[in-house]
Each structure stands twice: as structure tokens, then as C-alpha cells.
Amino acid sequence: MTSLVLYDKMRHAIAECARIDEAAGIRNKAAKLEAYARIRDDKDSQRRFGEIRLRACVRIGEISKELDKASGFEGNQHEVLPTDGKKQTKEHQLKEAGISTGSAAFCASFLASFLASFLTFYWAFY
């Protein structure tokens, strides 16, 4: 499996935050309440994680579409030629990556919808 250094560090840090209640060590109740409110109201971190997930979905959609083009057919039962030279079906490649064909189809349709929305928004201002 490919190493994602920053993503793996983030996951580890989130796991530590979930395991350890850092605010529990604060003695002053007002400061403790402030710390818990800061954690609860951290919309920026939630938004950034949402952006990471969104980007992953868009990339899955792009790659799924590329696999369709590589096969020369629209469908997932046709052979495609990956970089190692061994022919595999799109479905097999998705399965190896841990992605269901339904999930890939959702990401591909999401990508199309996302691009259409973006272009509509973009052209509305230009």
C-alpha cells in the first residue's frame, strides 16, 4: 500500500485526541469549559477534513473515468492495461484498491455534478 505520510500522521493525531481527553487535565472550570467549546466549535478542522474526503472522491471519479477510456468501452468488464503490463478488468483494479464499483460510479457521477456546478458558478461571475 502506498504511504501517505501526512494523512497517516493526521489519522494518528486524531486517534490520540479521541483516546486522551486533553481538557480533562485543566483545573479551572471556566478554562475547561472554554477548551471544550473550542473543540466542539472547530468548524475549520471539520471543513478541511471534508475537503480531503471530497478531493479523494473527485480523484476516484477521475481515475474511474480514465479506466473506462483505457478499456475503450464504457463499462467495467473490459480489460484495461495497467502500467505493469498485466491486463486486468476495471472491476478487479477497483477491488484491489478497496473500492466497490458502486462507490466508483458514485464518485464518477459526483465528479460530473461537481464540475457542472463549478462551471455554472464560475461563469455566473465572469
Image (tube, grey):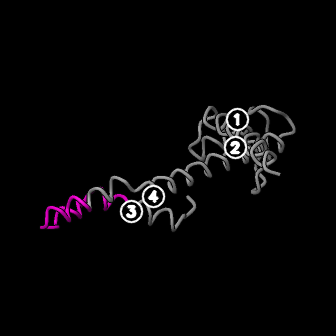
Q: Mark 4 points at which residue?
A: 45
Residue 117 appears at what percent x and percent y?
73, 40
- Examine the rendered structure and indicate whether residue 79 appears above or below residue 83: above
Secondary structure predominantly adopted by residues drawn in magenta: helix
Labels 1, 4: front one: 4
Task: Please rate how many residues cluster around mark 4, counting C-alpha atoms within 10 Å: few if below 14, some from 14 to 19, many from 20.
Answer: few
Q: Mark 1 points at which residue?
A: 109
The numbered mark, 1 or 3, whose residue comes first in the sequence reads: 3
Residues rendered magenta in the picture: 14-34
Which residue is at a point 76% across and 51% down the rendered structure image?
82
Residue 90 appears at what percent x and percent y?
72, 39
- The amino acid sitting under disc 1 is Ser
Labels 4, 2: front one: 4
Asked whether 23 falls inside the magenta stretch, the response is yes
Label 1: element kind: helix
- The amino acid sitting under disc 4 is Ser
Label 3: element kind: helix
Farthest residue, direction right: 72
Residue 63 appears at what percent x and percent y?
72, 48
Label 4: element kind: helix
The numbered mark, 3 or 2, whose residue comes first in the sequence reads: 3
The span from disc 3 to disc 2 (Cα, nearest Å) is 27 Å
Q: Name the residue under label 2.
A: 61
- The amino acid sitting under disc 2 is Gly
The span from disc 2 to disc 1 (Cα, nearest Å) is 7 Å
